[in-house]
Image (cartoon, rainbow, N blue to C red):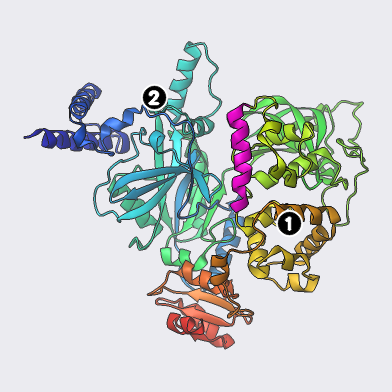
Amino acid sequence: MNIEQQINSLRDELREHNYKYYVLDQPSITDFEFDMKLKELQKLEAEHPEFYDPASPTLRVGGMVTKNFETVAHEHRMYSLENSYSKEDLEDWEKRIQRILGDVEVEFTCELKYDGASISLTYEEGQLVRAVTRGDGFQGDDVTNNIKTIKSVPLQLKGDFPPKFDIRGEIILTLDGFAKMNQERIEAGEDPYMNPRNTASGSLKLQDSALVAQRPLECLLYSIAGNNLGISSQFEVLEKARSWGFKVPTVAKLCESTEEVMQFADHWDINRHNLPYETDGVVVKVNNIQHQEELGYTAKSPRWAMAYKFKAESATTVLNEITYQVGRTGAITPVANLEPVLLAGTTVKRASLHNADQIAKLDVRVGDTVFVEKGGEIIPKITGVDFTKRSVDSAPTEYISNCPECDTELIRKEGEAQHFCPNDTGCPPQITGRIQHFISRKAMDIEGLGGETVELLFKEGLISNYADLYTLTKEQVIPLERMAEKSAENLVNGVAASKAIPFERVLFALGIRYVGETVAKKLAKAYKNIDALMVASHEELVAVDEIGERIAESVIKFFSEPTNLEIVERLKSYGLQFSLSEEQLENQTDKLKGLTFVVSGVFETISRNDLKKLIEDNGGKVASSISSKTSFVVAGDNMGPSKKTKAESLGVPIISEQEFMGKL
């Protein structure tokens, strides 16, 4: 056996032992024997660098240092899940599914919802090429070097895997591993970590991968994304992933009704504390992949999946003070400042009280002993008051009448839940809040500029609105606290680079009330440039898909204010993108304007998502279910029989993909 064969033989043997130990939990050799073989391989690789392999087991020890984690766009978006908290929520979800799919049998795959840090792993020809954090769902941080140190993540797959795909999962710390880490920290005189989830998430951003390798992290996988994967169900996804070498928990179950789903959820709500890792609920997915494609997505979540959350943990503590925060839109949020209390693994000191109505409803007062819960086990909230412990001289809470920041009298419009400060041009948190929104990742994504720096720039009188960012010089920024020459240079360069951000994101960045990412895209597509949008009438705006009365009024109000018009003109003069690019305009027409399409089935020459995009790019609207307002149903193979029947009963024309292409 020559050196290359010897090295490859050792690699194969170590991969198999690694798989048996970390994925199957069935070791076949001792730790000492494994370490000896690993050292032998390390020695041979060091002596013969010409046989380097990026998937070698020796890379798991770490040692690579990453100072700045590169931001990478997800090829397939990572959506968040809609939450449910009761059987009624799940039944309502099932009814929504049936309305879209029609009279077909729907199976559900139930899996435990792992409480860790989401990750997307990309494999090409069976090798791990990239690992990216969830980020905002559209883009995340490249943490490949750190992920390669996690023993349950295969660097090289086995079996009949597709040539390229993304697989999604959670990076977790087992409870035993977490306890061992904390014991070591305590013995070393250091503070223990608070909970496994935050510790796992923080581990991914450690700069030295050798430190990551020392942590007992695991990766549990649950879904894949890609093109032409040849997989027909979610349950098959789990089985296939397991056969390729991934660690996929075996507790998943196929259910035929929400009744069975609830039995699964109730069982694990009781037995979750016997698991080796933390879980906060059950993820329920429509099993059939074709059904998933039919159901599609909302702006934030897949319609075919739902997270059923276990009842949140609660605790009691004392409310010391109520303070008031001012948001970028002027909305006032009351905040309960609490006696610190441990809740679901974290120390809670503050909780939202939402608005004046909530304070009145709970009759919550300073000095009260209150019940605190983590809503969805994320955001702390006060759910009630222990009246048996209330002081006899307790006084009802009086909601503030003036802004805590600028002393302007607050207003509350009819039908609005919150009070507002109307001083939008002179109230400091509103000014800095709008600038912070402008620079945020989903908006202008200005590198080198964060929220604290915005506060500092405003405090020093260097900026009073987001247009002022484009006049900043390195010389102005360097004297600021904690600002070195390189940092100042990065900030100024980051602002300049943001001029290339596309129109729809610039529109979102302006901070028009109710205009989120999705609405900004709709408006950009409908009006093509800012000048057309600024003069749009109320009637024209509400005629745009998904633009209602409230959004139309807000857009008109924003562009009626001289200050906003002046800022937009300044931004134009600085070179920001205020119209769709030539490429975007070339791909858009009004050929399908006024027409509503429902897409159903499997297509030969185009994917379902690309077909929907074609409809929207040419002015049409895509609906999820057939109604009297549907203009056409574009039907592929395996169209649901109930959809066909409904279309025929309503007289809606059914066309093939070829006939649809003919319309373009």
Amino acid type assigned to the residue bearing label 1 in the image: Tyr
- Residue 106: x percent and y percent? 46, 65
Relative to 629, residue 218 above or below: above
- Mark 2 — residue? 214
Q: Main secondary structure of the magenta part?
A: helix
Q: Nearer the viewer, residue 69 or 219?
A: 69
Residue 487 magenta:
yes
Say few, some or many: other residues with alpha carbon within 10 Å of mark 1 (under 14 / 14 to 19 / 20 or more): some
- Mark 1 — residue? 514
Tell me: 395 left or right of 136. right
Tell me: 243 left or right of 431. left
Relative to 542, residue 480 above or below: above
Q: Quadrant of the N terminus?
A: top left
Residue 407 magenta:
no
Amino acid type assigned to the residue bearing label 2 in the image: Gln
Relative to 529, residue 374 above or below: above
Residue at horizontal 90%, vertical 38%? 400
Q: Which residues are magenta?
A: 484-500
